[in-house]
Image: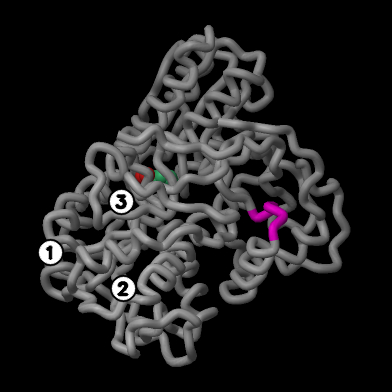
Amino acid sequence: MERREVGSNVSRRRFLRGLGAAGVVAAVPALAACGDDATEPVGQDTGPAGGGGSPAGGGGGEELAVGIMVPLSGTYASLGRDMINGFQLYLDEHGGQLAGRPVRIVEGETEANPEIGLRVARRFIEEERLPVVTGIVSSAVALGVRDLFDERQVPLIVSNAGANDVTRAQRSPVIFRTSFSNWQPAFSVGQWAAENLDVDTWFIIAPDYAAGHEDAAAFREAFADAGKEIVAEAFPPFGTTEDYQPFLSQIRQSEAGGVFAFFSGGEAISFVQQFRDFGLKDQLTLIGPGFLTDEGVLPAQGDAALGIRTSLHWTPLLDIPKNQEFTQAYEEAFGMQATVFSVQSYDAAQLIDLGLADYDGDLNEGAAVAEALAGVGELDSPRGPFRLDPDTHNPIQPFYLREVQEVEGAEGGLANAVIEELGEVRDPGA
Ligand code: BEZ
């Protein structure tokens, strides 16, 4: 990773504009820096998104039905909502069309459960014969459905789940990712910590499922040659842990100086609040992948999150016009802040729009549709321009070391400020 220090690269005025909060005075200069089960229907069909016109268009107006597999309940419910919103925003900005075709969105509720995810995927592929599917929050769900999409040659655009192997050993010509591999944010924050923090002993904590273990492994890898010590690790049960006290006791007893934590959604709120309430916040350094303090959880975490440093490929404070337009439009459309999950799903819609712009073949010829998607080139994302690795279909993109700081005008007064650019972080691949 190439990195360079950045100064005050985001004006507060622009940030406020992005948040639709004009007129508020800054306190801190900105910145540096389908409830589905066996009997329930899987898909909720939201109907054609309507007329208008996309600039792209090789489809001659034929309807394009896109499946979105997301959790709408449980720990990751808000992530699923954000992903639906992000996709919808892109559609709304393009007259309800992708690649010249009116779009019908079909929602499928997966929770974060691989069995439910597989049922949704089967229904989308075998019964509804949807030509393209996107979404998927959980690595466990992604790993569970990967073979089905590959075998049936149905294009899948993963817009969150970071399971490394989906774009490494188990990569497929029909599977794409507009988000990240779990390795990318975990390794980059680990490498930054190893090189920049005067903390020699670390504790790893993450939920006990694929993403938690992959994040822990990437953090360990970053520390392998750095002369730092990982003194202990804990993997609380995923989706059911509400009380982190037993794990916080372990952290205290370990006498580690720093904690690497991967949590997201409701678990990120609980962990960060309890870490403060247990008295560890003032004693230990807390870092992690950026989901720990993303905009969807930060207002609820409040001051408990202040000062936490994380690595991610986006923050609403990125000072680029595309991001300012996106965050403002999102806020206006949905009355809430955009999140990284909405960005990734917005870009999944963009990938379909641009990738299929010149495609005039049969939409159910999955291999041909995937080939068209693979040729998309650079995407102009709110995160900045990025491209997919031609071999793995995982994003090659810059990451940012962020710190939760007070920013008046931000929801709850807090935001993830960029304190260092970490440069392009490319997954090592298979
Ligand atoms: C995952 O399971 O891959 C994941 C879930 C939430 C945030 C980031 C990654």
> Disc 3 beta carbon < 8 A from ligand 1?
yes
Is residue 34 in view? no
Please state which of the two labelled residues, at mark 3 or mark 2, is closer to the viewer. 2
Label 2 vs label 1: CA separation? 22 Å
In the picture, the disc for residue 112 is 3
Q: Residue at x 60, y 37 (%)?
A: 423
Q: Which of 165 and 304 is in front in this view?
A: 165
Image quadrant in which the C terminus is located: top left
Is residue 150 in view? yes
**Magenta segment boundaries in residue numbering:** 316-320
Name which quarter of the figure residue 286 lies in: top right
Label 3 vs label 2: CA separation? 20 Å
Q: Up-down: is 357 above or below 393?
A: below
In the picture, the disc for residue 168 is none
Q: Position of residue 381 (x, y in %)?
A: 55, 60
Q: Residues within 10 Å of mark 3 (few under 14, many from 20)?
A: many
Name which quarter of the figure residue 406 lies in: top right
Q: Up-down: is 94 above or below 236?
A: below
